[in-house]
Image (cartoon, rainbow, N blue to C red):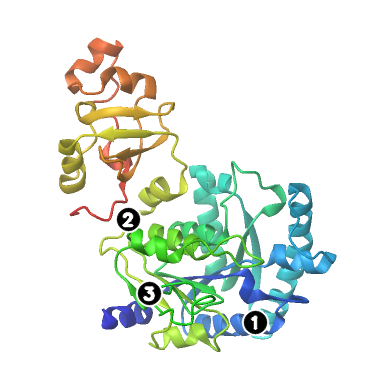
Amino acid sequence: MKNNRKSIFNNAKRLVVKVGSNVLTEDHGLNLKAIRSISRQICRLIDSGLEVILISSGAMASGVKKVGLDKRPDEIPKRQAIAAVGQAGLIMEYEKAFARYHKKVAQILLTGDDLNNRRRYLNARNTLCMLLSWKVVPIINENDTVMIDEIQFGDNDNLAAMITLLMDADILVNLTDIDGLYTKNPRKYPDAELIPLVSTIRENIEKVAGDIPGPLGTGGMLSKINAARKVTASGIPMVIANGGKPDILLKLFSGKEFGTFFVSKKKKLKSRKCWIAFTLKPKGAIRIDDGAAAAILNRGKSLLPSGIVHVEGEFNVGAPVEFKTGDNETLGTGLVNYSSADIRKIMGLKSSQIKKILGHKPYDDVIHRDNLAITSEYHNL
């Protein structure tokens, strides 16, 4: 596995770097030394032939300090205004830092709506690809000034995972203020040990991560684990490392084994299936029997009505819906050919009976295999 980790860094062509608030800020505002260090390292990687996309936190934290508040306000209008103030200062410092190495930057602010819509999703990808072809560094953040619960990513760890999948990157490097994932909270327990390698993200890993947000950021270690789950399930590895460690990016790409490395699945999901699996928000769920689960997971089959035993929620034709086992294990997500109301009428029946029950039969399957993305870690594909 060590050789595999080294070869992944050696062979990487496209990299997503996410930097957390606690790395980029200090008591008086932005940590300019950290911004300059990370910018310099990214420029070095670009000069070596890598394409780099930067997901940068720090706008909210920068704005809090700039306006003179002691903490992030609870009221949404104030938080949105704080983000607007902070984002201007953040991108200005990046622009100055990258200009030292003759590199240009582009600011991109996104909401969940921008990636949920397939057309806008592809437009975002095309824009980012064009910027990379021009050797311009995209610096991406969530558009906090217009955020509402329905369209927000939630935190920049999730945003980084979404961009990694959108751009089919080779690796995601998540820089935070500790050395990686530990056996327990290293801020509280001196005997906590670093976990250098995670092959499978199981419940014990989530329990170890807990939810320990920093004083300025919205994400904690658990949000990083959730990001790792998404990218590794799609065939892309991830590293959590200490962004304050000198030249951490350069050391990682020189073969040094810092941080926690999350091993990816061998088979990479195609871009469209990544979009279905991890970008779209499920509108409901379908429970399936063991036979249907085996057919989907091991033989690449579509989901037929005969294998469905229960429907959760209300949704329309074309909606993204999770499909689960009887034990409530989520196997993946797919785009349905029938509404929840119609699926309840035909579940358990053969496809040949659909027209008799509904009066029409546009499809034999409830979810076609081309619109079905498997995310379970326990299948044999």
Callout 3: SS = strand
Q: Are marks 2 and 1 in contact (CB under 8 Å)?
A: no
How far apart, in angstroms, are the residues tagged by discs 3 and 2?
20 Å
Q: Nearer the viewer, residue 158 or 326?
A: 326
124 to the left or right of 340: right
Residue at 40% x, 61% y is 206
* Quadrant holding the C terminus: bottom left
Q: Is residue 228 above or below residue 103?
A: above
Q: Residue 124 sits in which quadrant?
A: bottom right
Callout 2: SS = loop
224 to the left or right of 309: right
Q: Residue 255 sits in which quadrant?
A: bottom left
Task: Compare marks 3 and 1 and give the one earlier in the sequence.
Answer: 1
Q: Position of residue 44 (x, y in %)?
A: 54, 86
2 vs 1, front mark: 1
Q: Position of residue 114 (x, y in %)?
A: 57, 47
* Quadrant holding the N terminus: bottom left
Q: Is residue 116 above or below residue 12?
A: above
93 to the left or right of 241: right
Q: Position of residue 219 (x, y in %)?
A: 56, 61
Residue at 65% x, 75% y is 24
* Residue linked to disc 2: 269
How far apart, in angstroms, are the residues tagged by discs 2 and 1?
34 Å
* Residue linked to disc 3: 261
Callout 1: SS = helix
The residue under label 1 is which amino acid type?
Answer: Ala
